[in-house]
Amino acid sequence: MDKIHLNKDALKFRDEILGSPGGENLLKCYACGACAASCPVREVDERYNPRRIIHMVLLGMREEVLRSDFIWLCSTCYTCSERCPQGVRLSTIMQVLKNIAVREGIVPPSFQMQLKAIREQGKLYEIEDFDNKKRSRMGLPELEKKCPDVDILMQGGTLRDVK
Ligand code: SF4
Ligand code: SF4
């Protein structure tokens, strides 16, 4: 691994997270690993390690963190936040990292596709004729392919504007 040089820019990233709501206790992390040990995502993918991500943030590895697929794997289950003895709100920090990545246009293609699907049809998954046939066999009403209120909401309307 390349040497890590702590410079002012590195500290700026750390301070950015420290100054974000939920990031206040970042420096209290003492690397106990309780977050990694209790993370359900890590249970299925050993490469994912929330403790490592926190330490990359502490070392100011901005590009590496924001460009990493791993921040997107966090399911925001809050287990790590519940278990952290130091009150590091890791799940909130993951959200902060995702928000910064989005602001900088670093969004994995799969999330962009999900966003497109929600914008266009108001649903994450397309409703096919096959789905409605299955529903009708089970006595369930048909689902519309496009949520009728999505255009109102996407044009800045609120739920109050939806009939
Ligand atoms: S549980 Fe908390 S203190 Fe322990 S490594 Fe994770 S973030 Fe750090
Ligand atoms: S909030 Fe994210 S990092 Fe924390 S335990 Fe859940 S999946 Fe793992």
Image: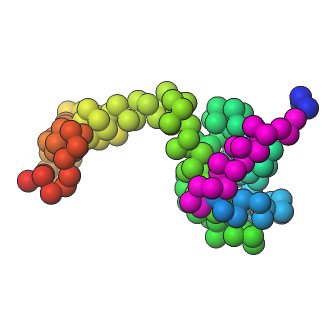
Horizontal placement of 49 versus 149: left or right?
Answer: right
Magenta residues span 5-22
**Residue at left offset 59%, top offset 61%:** 22
- In the rendering, at what x and y percent does residue 100 appear? 56, 41
View extreme (left): residue: 163
- In the rendering, at what x and y percent does residue 81 appear? 64, 65
- In the rendering, at what x and y percent does residue 78 appear? 58, 63
Question: Against 69, is 18 above or below?
Answer: below
- In the rendering, at what x and y percent does residue 46 appear? 74, 45
Q: Is residue 148 covered in magenta? A: no
**Residue at left offset 70%, top offset 43%:** 13
Horizontal placement of 150 versus 99: left or right?
Answer: left
Relative depth, front residue between 44 and 21:
21
Horizontal placement of 128 versus 68: left or right?
Answer: left
Q: How many marks?
A: 0
Relative depth, front residue between 3 and 107:
3
Relative depth, front residue between 151 and 45:
151
Main SS of residues in magenta: helix
**Residue at left offset 75%, top offset 37%:** 9
Q: Is residue 41 visible?
A: no
- Residue 70 quadrant: top right
Horizontal placement of 128 versus 44: left or right?
Answer: left
Question: Against 47, is 84 above or below?
Answer: below
Its colouring scheme is: rainbow
Q: Is residue 19 covered in magenta? A: yes
**Residue at left offset 54%, top offset 32%:** 104
Q: Is residue 67 visible?
A: yes
View extreme (front): residue: 8
